[in-house]
Image (cartoon, rainbow, N blue to C red):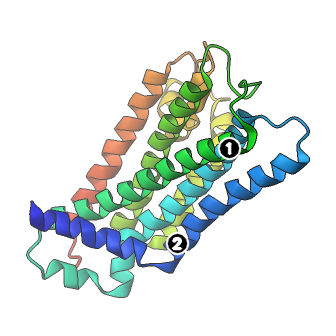
Amino acid sequence: MADFLNLVRNENMKIYYRVRTWVMSAILLVLPLAMSIIGRFVDDSPNMWSYVMLESGLMTMLLSIFAVVMAADSVAGEFSNGTIKLLLIRPWSRNKILLSKYLALLCYIVLNLAVFFALTLLLNFVLFGGGDSGSSIPSGWSPFGYVTAWYGLNLIEMAVVATMAFMISSVFRSGGLAIGLSIFALLGSGIISSLLSLIDKPWIDYVLFMHFGLERYLNAGELFRGHSLGFSLGVLAGYYVLFLALSWYVFNRRDVAA
């Protein structure tokens, strides 16, 4: 167990030793700070929760893109740099190597999302005070409860997208392909789901793109094509398991040392 934890720590060190990791984190910290300070002086009637939701929407999108970049480079980068051979000659199974990389990726996502969640709440509370929720929070929700649920659902989406990038990186050993396809799925899901909604076929309900944007379920009574949040979570869970299974199967079967 200790050896595996050292392996996970080693993968985390690879992430945080890169300059781009700190540049990405700095962007996630500086942008909301700048937005809130500017809003404090130019907005005639600033509302804490409005700025929390505005900054959260932008920053979670950026963090999703950063997570895709990390996931794409996690495995494909080892092949392009030739360091995969150094990993495989050590006394660790391929399962442990891949699992350590995946856990390090999840730690990066959760840590950054938690820090940003705390930052936006504290920053905007200090600058604008508590106040009421205004129109930024749907009725029936407490502001803090809604924001917490919103972050939880976005964490699920982020994990699915990052896992898809991780799978593509493992299967095709191409970081560029993993980044391109995953960001396309992330940014184009709204347009794709709108187009697919025009097709009156039952199988449309099981297409991955149709189930991004889970926060829509937080609006009271809103359903997706007659289905609930549980249905969307079930479909995403199915894709999540599929992505992981493909990653492990291909990584274990392929002659990665060649």
- Residue at screen point 52% across, 33% down: 148
- Residue at screen point 54% across, 25% down: 145
Earlier sequence position, callout 2 versus callout 1: 2
Q: Quadrant of residue 63?
A: bottom right
Left/right placement of residue 154 relative to residue 247 reads: right
- Mark 1: which secondary structure? helix
Residue 237 vertical placement versus 82 (above, below) = above
Report the front residue among 71 and 170. 71
Report the front residue among 66 and 72. 66
Q: Is residue 253 visible?
A: no
Q: Position of residue 178 (x, y in %)?
A: 47, 64
Label 1 sits on residue: 126
Which quadrant is home to the C terminus? Answer: bottom left
Q: Position of residue 190 (x, y in %)?
A: 66, 41
- Residue at screen point 51% across, 79% down: 19
The count of marks equals: 2
Left/right placement of residue 189 relative to residue 251 reads: right
Residue 44 vertical placement versus 186 (above, below) = above
Which quadrant is home to the N terminus? Answer: bottom left
Report the front residue among 249 and 37. 37
Mark 1 Cα within 10 Å, few/some/many (few <14, many 20+)?
few
Q: CA distance from mark 2 to mark 1?
A: 25 Å
Give the amino acid type for the residue marked by disc 1 in the picture.
Val
Residue 17 vertical placement versus 154 (above, below) = below
Label 2 sits on residue: 22
- Mark 2: which secondary structure? helix
Give the amino acid type for the residue marked by disc 2 in the picture.
Trp
Report the front residue among 171 and 163. 163
Q: Is residue 47 visible?
A: yes
